[in-house]
Amino acid sequence: MDELSDLYNDLIMEHSMNSCNKKELKCYDCCKMGHNPNCGDEIKLELKMDGDVIEDLAFVGHGCAISQASTSIMIDTLRGKAIYEAKKIIETFIGMIKREITDEAELEKLEDAIAFRNISHMPARVKCALLAWHTIEDMLDERERKVDGE
Amino acid sequence: MNSSDIKKDFPILQNRKESYLDSAATTQKPKQVIDAIDEYYKNFNANPHRGAYSLSIEATQKYEETREKIAKFINAKHTEEIIFSKNATESLNLIAYSYGMENLKVDDEVVLSIMEHHSNLVPWQKVSKVTGCKLNYMYLNDNFEISDEEIEAKITDRTKIVGITHISNVLGTINDVKKIIKYAHKKGAIVVIDATQSIQHMKIDVQDLDADFIVFSGHKILAALGIGVLYGKKEILNKMTPFLMGGDMIEYVYEQNTTYAPLPNKFEAGTQNVEGVISLGAAIDYIETIGYDNIQRIEKEIVDYAMQELSKLDYLTLYVTPNRAHHSSVISFNIKGVHPHDVASILDANGVCVRSGNHCAQPLMRYLGIDSTCRASFYIYNTKEDVDNLVNALNKAYEMFKKYM
């Protein structure tokens, strides 16, 4: 129960219940749906680029507190980052959840997203925390392939 | 006899401290079932229907005796009307492929209820895509039940198959399948009953129901995982072609052609799950020793208590028919404003096992206008203490979220 209280802390609860990132962008370059069929979590992520920099991100959707907060905190973390920085952060986050990355200095780069580190002990919730991160990972990969193709 | 006495028969409920409220997903197993599997492997294991030696013959006898036991249990007219499968899903796929694909045509209609589990829905979508037949749904009234008007509006002269769950795995609604079968037969349709959520709770008499097909999974009625049953009327099964091809379902095999074995072997290709069949036999013995009268009395007491206590929590939404006589032992609920997955995690941390999600019933969820629910499901080994644990854990979950709402 203690571990759970740690997880459902003020930061995560505020982001899940009252996120200012939960909205539609006026204009964006691409959007993508992320879906966990087993639990029904569903998000639509919108991405606006300024050259190679993530100018803005926003999301709409529904799901558990973990999936919604993880999406919102991810947006705060990645906004304003260059693609190469963002990709490194995404990799670190996924590595943290899978318990492959435990180095504190490395994890510090995740900023608020480090709040999800205990999820790695809760296998039933890993998918919830990773939904948005896998979705943005796919979006950036797709964008890269498109740019390479041009 | 009460649930505390029964609980003593279930080793896992002695070994673990959790309140297990997910019996609609799978029931726990009594010692008698676990021992029967142990005894089978220690004394009788061989490949049935294959060997000319005594051990194989004894394994065959155990396997076939259980078929007879199941036939008697559901009052089938003929033992060969009982076909063993992997689970209810495989039984339903068998019906969809071997009956549906062969008999349905464009303009024919398949009618399902909107409360079907995906296993009695997705196979019929496939049949519909291949044959061109139409798929229609019976919807629910405000009490989460299917009205007579709805039955009569949807089952028409063009309906060839009606698929209906006896008890909803989400709402716990008990459908009046006898009435539906009678009406469907009047219209010339056959009926597929999914008894996966009912056979552990109430007596099923296939002749009294006049059911064409009935399916269920062993693991939801105290038996091992991986064993299921298909009951079908002999005259219908005889006209159907096999579903899976291979060993033991044949008569003569030539280079280019094969003739098939008679029922029931025609539908049992390959070495079967004898362990599972034996466990199902032991589970039925256990159910019969307790008796359905006792099962219903014990369940009624615990579900009445759960409904009484849960109804007091004004932060909960319950998805249950107010007609208690039409409600089984599944209670779906949500804490208003909190996602069920979060609730289930907090209940888990407080030692209460419930299911959360769409319960393999996405069309029903969409129809109800929700994404998912928490579901507590009760069986004969659940006690009032389990209900109290659920209520206490729900209060904690609500407290955790309340300040952020």
Image (cartoon, helix red, strand yellow):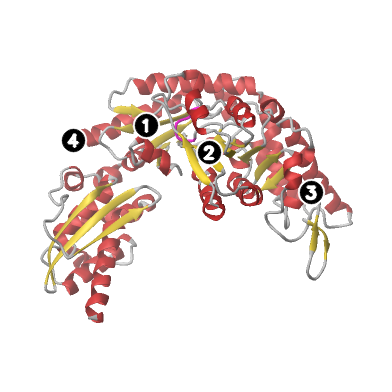
- Residue B194 in the image, given as x and y percentages of width and height: 58, 37
Q: Nearer the viewer, residue B390 or B164?
A: B164
Residues at marks 3 and 4 touching, judged by CB atoms closer than 8 Å: no
The chain ID associated with circle 3 is: B
Q: Nearer the viewer, residue A11 or B92?
A: B92
Residue labelled with disc 1: B333
Confirm whether the magenta stretch covers residue B12.
no
The disc placed on residue B111 is 2
User: Comparing marks 2 and 3, which lies closer to the viewer?
Assistant: 2
Disc 2 with disc 3 on a shared chain:
yes
Q: Secondary structure at mark 4?
A: loop
The disc placed on residue B405 is 4
The chain ID associated with circle 4 is: B
The chain ID associated with circle 1 is: B
Residue labelled with disc 3: B43
Amino acid at the residue labelled 1: Phe
Q: Kindly identify the residue that appears in the image at 47 percent across and 23 percent down.
A: B303
Q: Earlier in the sequence, mark 3 or mark 4?
A: 3
Per the model, the C-alpha gap separating discs 1 and 3 is 47 Å
Residues at marks 4 and 2 touching, judged by CB atoms closer than 8 Å: no
